[in-house]
Amino acid sequence: MYDSVIIGSGPAGITAAIYMKRAGLNVVVIGKDDGALGKTNKVENYYGFENPISGNELLENGRKQAKRLGITIVEDEVVLIEIIDNGFQIKTVNSSFEAKTALLATGADRQIPNIKGMKEYEGKGVSYCAICDAFFYRNKKVAVLGSGNYAINEINTLLPVAASVTMITNGEKPIENRSSEIPIVEKKIREVRGDESKIQQIDFEDESNLNIDGLFIAVGVASSTALARKIGAMINGKNIVVNEKQQTNVPGLYAAGDCTGGILQISKATYEGMKAGLDIIQYIKKTK
């Protein structure tokens, strides 16, 4: 069992890992992609760089620094966090990890699709957490919006409960490693509709429609906010609520970086990563 699993290999996650590793903790970092920083062409407002540096270069330098210290960085996609007796179990597409603490640092949640009616039916049939809300859709027709491993994980949670589950990709190509029994609709969505109390129907751009009782959003990869919500962490809008030590309301669960809101800057991410790392060190010491 690890002392800490860090989900996210950007500035917040890597900074936290470095502090923990230097304190003798056994940590692993899991990262899927380079996030918003990886798409940044030039960074010229970060301390210590005389000349501009690309976001990719900055990320790679941080990861090389972590690896030099012996920190393991796993390239994989986290699809679920669960609370276990002595910590957390983190499930990825290819593996599973157990740790006494977990740090969410995968950046801001940018995966809410801009579809007419989506916002209006949040809490009225539109859900962002299958493990939280599956119970309410027993023997009902539901759909999952998404095309990747995260969507497949949500579908697998719903299948034993719902009367039917349909995968809607909104024009994207669905991932290949999926059950052939899952109906898939690859059409683009025009609108979600219903009455005043609940969602009832999805309208597609080709004028066809699908009657449903619930729609679960699982676009792209699972964000820090989505993962936190599944184990009862407090969320404010798209942001994870933390205290001054980066602790969530779930003991042993921390969050740092863009996922906590505020100014979306590298300096803020490294600062919060440092705070989280230092507090996790104290948390682990107290449990030994």
Image: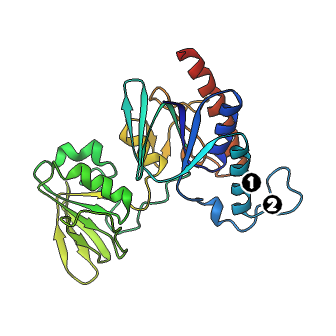
- Residue extending farthest right: 50
Residue kind at label 2, given as amino acid type: Glu
Could you tell me residue 109's position as x and y percent? Answer: 49, 54
Residue 9 appears in the rendering: yes
Mark 2 is surrounded, within 10 Å at the Cα level, by few (under 14), some (14 to 19) or many (20 or more) other residues, namely: few
Say whether residue 104 is left or right of residue 208.
Answer: right
- Residue 144 appears at what percent x and percent y? 28, 60
Element carrying mark 2: loop
**Which residue is nearer to you in this view: 277 or 246?**
277
Q: Quadrant of the C terminus?
A: top right
Which image quadrant is residue 133 in?
Answer: top left
Q: Amino acid at mark 1?
A: Asn
Would you say 43 lies left or right of 178 here?
right
Image height check: is 86 above or below 52? above
- 102 and 71: which is toward the camera: 71
Residue drawn at x 57%, y 15% is 286
Label 1 sits on residue: 61
Which percent across, then down, holds residue 40? 68, 65
Residue on which the image places disc 2: 44
C-alpha separation, residue under disc 1 versus residue under disc 2: 15 Å
Q: Measuring 36% from the left and 41% from the top, which residue is drawn there? A: 230
Horizontally, residue 195 falls left or right of residue 129, namely left
- The x and y percentages for residue 4 are 54, 33
Q: Is residue 159 above or below residue 55?
A: above
Q: Is residue 78 left or right of residue 213?
A: right
